[in-house]
Image (tube, coloured by chain):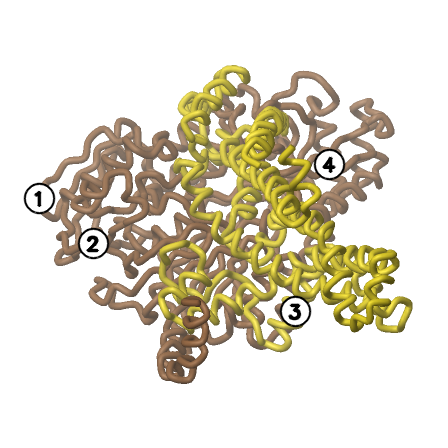
Amino acid sequence: MTAFLIRRLLAMVPVLALVLVIVFSLVRLIPGDPAVTLLGPGATQQQISALRLQLDLDKSLPLQFVSYLGGLAQGDLGQSLKSGLPVARELLSRLPATLELAFVALIGAILVGIPLGVVSATRPNSALDHALRVGSLVGVSVPAFLLALILQLVFSVWLGWLPVSGRASPFATGAGATGFALLDSLLAGNPRAFLDGLAHVILPATVLAAFLAATLGRFVRNALMETLGEDFIRTARAKGLTRAEVVYGHGLRNALLPAITVVGLKFAEMLGGAVLTETIFAWPGIGRYMFEAIRNRDYPVIQGTTLLFALIFVASSIVVDILHALLDPRIRRKVAS
Amino acid sequence: MRLTTHILAAFVAVPLLSGAALAQDADRAKTLVVAVPSDPVNLEPGTNRAEPIGSEVILNVFDTLVAWTPPEFGKLEGRLATAWTVSPDGKVFDFTLREGVKFHDGTPFDAEAVKFSLERTKTTNPYVQATFNLIKEIAVTSPTGVRITLSDPYPAFLSILAQPQSAIVSPTAAKASGDKFATNPVGTGPFVFKSYKADTEVVLEANPSYFRGAPKLSRLVFRVIPAASTRRLEIESGGVDVVQQGGQLAAIAAEDVAALAKNPNVAILTSPSQIIRQLEFNNNKTEGPFTDVRVRRAIAHAIDYDGLLSGIFGGTAERVYGPLTSNNWAFNPKVKDLAPNYDPKKAKALLAEAGVDPAKLDLKLYSFQGALWGAVATFVQANLADIGVKATIQQTEFPALRALQTSGQFDVALDGRQPWYNDPDAHITIGYLSDLAATAMTFRMPKDAMLDGLITKAQQTADTEARKQLYFQIQEEIVKRVPGAYLFSPKLIVFARSNVKGLVVNSAPPLNEYWSVSKQ
């Protein structure tokens, strides 16, 4: 298992390196000089040159890359061109917000997606199955910004149940120990802050979860139907097991294995989707941070966030592999040998 | 296990907390929440680069020596200064300072603080260096007297002192915080800085001992909401009290403005601005059809200015005739007649006279992103089609358009400027002085000894009436050269919940003070 892990971790390095090279050159290919953008109107050529010098933008691309790599080796992601603050610290302070949103969305997607898939699979071609399939098709295809707008209109503006945007009511919460607002409010024994945070997270998490829940539902339905058609299920039935025992004890257990792969990979994809969702819901996470950085041509921030997203993507695929090995004795044996 | 206990405890405790919730409602009634489109940076004069949101925070936490008097903004009033005199040569400014004022940290405000602040900003803020470098000496003449001497006469200097970048900081706090002062700003203003949470909010609290009287609000919160559609929904649902339209790059769309106008809970406050939006030519080009003034004039005659205002803006923008807006104190009314009017026939005749076949003028019309700019570009495109000129619209992101302009790789572009201080200098010098041609947001004017000379002279003339006459002449000269077609001046728009009273929309700089605001 250790050898397996080391192999997988080593394989991450070239992937991340490639991502870095691509992003580093791509952000510099989009037209727009950060120095001009930062200084605004009326800046003289002299001021622009001075700022370019100060920001190291006057060096050649390969030189800039080498100095960036040098910093990276020491865990230094550079400084934001806009705020002048270290990117690594800025990212870390925003990461909890994104992870919190993603985890809530993930839990929601699992709680909704899997039961939907099971219900559909156990009643194939029933009216309910058709309705759920149409629902999941909608969930997969509706664009996030549209869903977000509809939810905001219905639940916030018309019904007034939930806040339109933000992570907490203004000045409602203080800084917590972990940076995860929901967890912090619980640890601090502050139920009002917890409920306030919960009310804020519901809509963005729903938008983020919609695609995953729908995908997961469709996937579980297909996998479970396939499993339920297999020989060992017939044997289990023949042994006189109840329908529930057959579906949940034997069918779902086997069907869930591939579903874990889907969840793992889609989770990382979902973080990418956070760029749009966080922007719409004014959620102070890394997706939004990246969105604004692109607008400002804040190169170090764009590089840092992309690298972080890539890291999460690769890491979650490793976690999936490990989970797989833990759950499936056949893979475990193969890994060990 | 511990977590579940906490959750259970949480739900049990909820009813007990309803009393606290009521207290919070009372708080909300005296809290003004302002939605802003992006995270403010550099919340102190020494580092702020005219970033609008940080600037507005500064204006509410700090005070300047002088400020423009609302609502006309045509006259300066004293803030931290009670009186001032300018020497006849326009180089020496003597200020008498207000007595008994204290910074939020208790440090007394005096002449030393003024000297410290302005000298500090001069060295730390590259954004204002161009004007602050004119300061030769700041002398403390008494505890309540400051004399600022400039190396060259610069009558717009008082306007510069009204900018947020010229606000006075607490020397004690600035020295103690060092480069962390932007996250712990301390001034004399109506609000005291309380907290800043990145990408989330800036919280200010009332300064009960403010020298103009304590603000009516107890708290002022700037909430960062990047999506315009979300800002609209927030003001409709009452989640925020004020939304600023700001620049049109991140503005609420025109159809949303129309919808908000029908909402009885939302008031739309407008004020004429000094912003100018134009179709500009690349005046630095030495070849191509647009080097001929007749071709430029033809394009300017092709545009239906009044149609643009009524068709696209529905009353939220005003006509512009030349390089200054009609509300500027140096506006020359003669420009109204000199500026090319909508006359497609004349446009065609001019093209024929210049020997240019309109069908061969295949233009790329560059513009900013966004629905509003798209609508303006489409309108102009149709106008150009009427005189037989084909234009392809290319909407580009803000930084990309700037890059295109500074590198000069365009013929025509839609563009505009928002002057940051209230003086004709803000439009004229930056826009038309040929020395600045290659910098951002200019008309890229070619070397022009006569015009350059006039601009520099007007910039340095101390006598207001003589200065005005110079700007009159400059405007006529510029309009003669047709560096662009002046399209419109958008009004400044602020959306406020109808219970918000006393808000005055400032024009130059377009930043609001919340000292006078209350909620009913």
Left of A14 or right of it: where is A90?
A: left
Q: CA distance from mark 3 to mark 1?
A: 61 Å
Q: Chain of mark 1?
A: B
Dot 1 or dot 2: first in sequence order is 2
**How many dots with numbers?**
4
The amino acid pointed to by label 1 is Ser
Q: Quadrant of residue A306?
A: top right
Instruction: Identify the residue shown where x is 25% and y is 46%.
Output: B168
Q: CA distance from mark 4 to mark 1?
A: 59 Å
Residue under label 3, please give it: A153
Tag 3 and tag 1, C-beta contact below 8 Å: no
Chain coloured yellow here = A
Nearest to the observer: residue A208 or residue B260: A208
Q: Nearer the viewer, mark 4 or mark 2?
A: 4
Dot 4 or dot 1: first in sequence order is 1
Instruction: Identify the residue shown where x is 28% and y is 38%.
Output: B179
Tag 3 and tag 4, C-beta contact below 8 Å: no
* Residue B94 visible in the displayed image: no
